Amino acid sequence: MRAARQAWRRLEPVHGMIYFVPEAPERYAALGLDARAGYFASRAAAFGRASAEVVIATFYNFNPAVVRRALPAAWEKATPEQLLAARAEAAGAALRRAGVDRLSGLEETLALARRAAEGARDHAQGRPLYAAHAALPWPDEPILRLWWAQTLLREFRGDGHVAVLTAEGVTPLEALVLHAATGTIPTPFLKATRAWPAAEWDATVERLRGRGLLDGESLTTEGEDFRRHIEDRTDALALPAYSALGEDGCERLAELARPFGRAVVDAGLLTPA
């Protein structure tokens, strides 16, 4: 499980940068959408003209009111096909700007990541975001195929994460507050992007303090154990995607992925635009 998690984490920046680079909102704006509507619509476009309720359910931790302001209104300005194309164009432009397409080892890295992403098709039940994306055609350009492979793997893992949160009875806002308490992502960024009212956020913090999971806004020992349990269960549910590679293949992918993820980070592609 450790090798599979490393493979995912090291290659994840190749996918995750699409949420931060300026190339994405620029292309959404060209279609008449602001950055927030562009995010919801472009990621949901794999479903077709998705309703707000589908996005609320599958994206999980966003304030439903914000989603409903974006959808279905976005579909009046742009089609799902246009948004999928805009997202791919943005990804390619950003990765090329960072020189990721010129790194050695791209062919082997892509082959391993694609084998895992396609192998996950045999385990797609209960994975709506993964299944919707997996039904779409692969891009032609090698660097975009690598981005697409990691997109599929990210959505596969994310679907499993939502399943764990639901099984553990963790509400969307509780999941967000617990994530903020780890310190891995700045709390102001999570508050701004997920857009929950301050009163609801504060009430959730107090509720989690009452459960012994938070001390102030930091995790208690019990809270750290609970977060670790959630991540371990998420990792376990992500394993079927990597079973096609075996342990040696996962270790090789983790080794190859390091310079690709590092190039994205060093180029500042994970810094919010």
Image (cartoon, grey):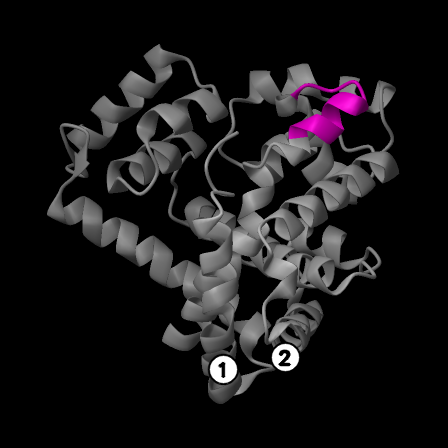
Quadrant of the drawing holding the N terminus: bottom left
Q: Nearer the viewer, residue 169 or 23?
A: 23
Residue 271 colored magenta?
A: no
Dot 1 amino acid type: Arg
How many marks can you see? 2
Circle 2: element type: helix
Q: Is residue 95 left or right of residue 209?
A: right
Q: Where residue 42 sits in the image (x, y, percent)?
A: 72, 36
Q: Is residue 184 above or below residue 124?
A: above
Please report the bounds of the magenta region as a residue range: 25-34
Q: Is residue 115 above or below residue 181?
A: below
The residue that appears at 70% across and 41% down in the rendered structure is 90
**In this view of the protein, can residue 53 be seen by the observer?**
no
Q: Quadrant of residue 127?
A: bottom right
Q: Give me the disc on residue 108.
A: 2
Q: Is residue 126 above or below residue 192?
A: below
Report, in whole angstroms, how far the alpha carbon at label 2 lies from the one at label 1: 9 Å
The residue that appears at 53% across and 29% down in the rendered structure is 273
Q: Quadrant of residue 199?
A: top left
Q: Where residue 126 sits in the image (x, y, percent)?
A: 63, 56
Dot 2 amino acid type: Glu
Circles 2 and 1: CB atoms closer than 8 Å? yes
Q: Quadrant of residue 186?
A: top left
Write down the residue under mark 1.
252
| Mark 2 neighbour density, 10 Å: few (under 14) some (14–19) many (20 or more) | some
Q: Nearer the viewer, residue 198 or 250?
A: 250
Q: Is residue 244 above or below residue 145?
A: below
Q: Where residue 8 sits in the image (x, y, percent)?
A: 49, 64
Circle 1: element type: helix
The residue that appears at 31% across and 43% down in the rendered structure is 184
